[in-house]
Image: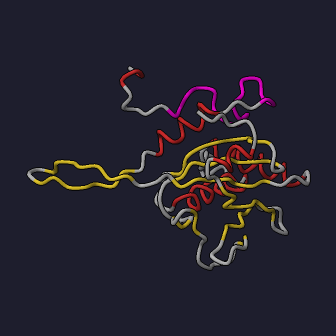
Amino acid sequence: MKKIKTIQDLIDLGFVVVSKAYLDKSNKLGWNHLKVSGDYNSLRESYGEVLGYKLNQGKWVYAIVIDKSIIIKTGKAECKNGIQGRLGSYLAGNPAYDNNDDGKPTNASTNRKIYRGVSKFLKEGKSVDIYAFPVPVEYEEKKIWDIIEKVPNQNVQEYEQSMYDRLELDYTPNGKPLWNKEKQAFKNKYDSSNN
């Protein structure tokens, strides 16, 4: 099993830069996504493709990388709008949206942490890139009532766990990204060893 110790190891596994973080004139975080032209921007034009998947389609595993050398977080994007949707959810971590009119929190702690952390790195003059890999669709036969059908399956949890298991970063105490939760939240909830 190939270990992930450097950014080149991610690239060797098929990861590519799909998005680059930026701060706008009012210091709000944004993402410049890979476009069909090969450029990175936030304009509304067709998203680029990686291995035949547009950024707003399918399921992905990703790494947030600082200055093209430090993997600070890994994760999965299994939402409706692919990796583009996952990155969009991080924008909900904007401190302006921390509380609703009743004073209750309105966004997840992960979104707040990523928004604030990425913004801090950008203010320090560091680059923040998203390296991602689209999880391939596999087809499996399933009996649905009285018919055997081929059903698409993207096992994003397996890819995320494999990526996590391969990480051996020499700049963190446990070899894992600093912003990942210590517990193994990646285990498949159907794995019998979790019971």
Q: Is residue 40 left or right of residue 144?
A: right
Residue 121 placement (x, y as % from top left): 84, 49
Q: Is residue 82 left or right of residue 113?
A: left
Please, what is the dominant secondary structure of the magenta stretch?
loop
Q: Residue at x 73, y 34 (%)?
A: 178
Compared to 53, does 194 lie above or below? above
Q: Nearer the viewer, residue 170 or 92?
A: 170
Residue 169 placement (x, y as % from top left): 74, 32
The N terminus, quarter of image: top right
The quadrant in which residue 23 appears is: bottom right
Residue 138 placement (x, y as % from top left): 37, 52
Q: How is the image coloured?
A: secondary structure
The quadrant in which residue 25 appears is: bottom right
Residue 191 appears in the figure = yes
Most extreme residue toward the right, as rendered? 124
How many numbered marks does the figure carry? 0
Residue 129 placement (x, y as % from top left): 74, 55
Q: Residue at x 74, y 42 (%)?
A: 71
Q: Nearer the viewer, residue 74 or 8?
A: 8
The C terminus, quarter of image: top left
The quadrant in which residue 108 appears is: top right
Compared to 55, does 123 lie above or below? above
Q: Residue at x 62, y 33 (%)?
A: 166
Q: Residue at x 51, y 64 (%)?
A: 53
Residue 104 appears in the figure = no
State yes or no: residue 184 in magenta.
yes
State yes or no: residue 82 in magenta.
no
Q: Which residues are magenta?
A: 170-186
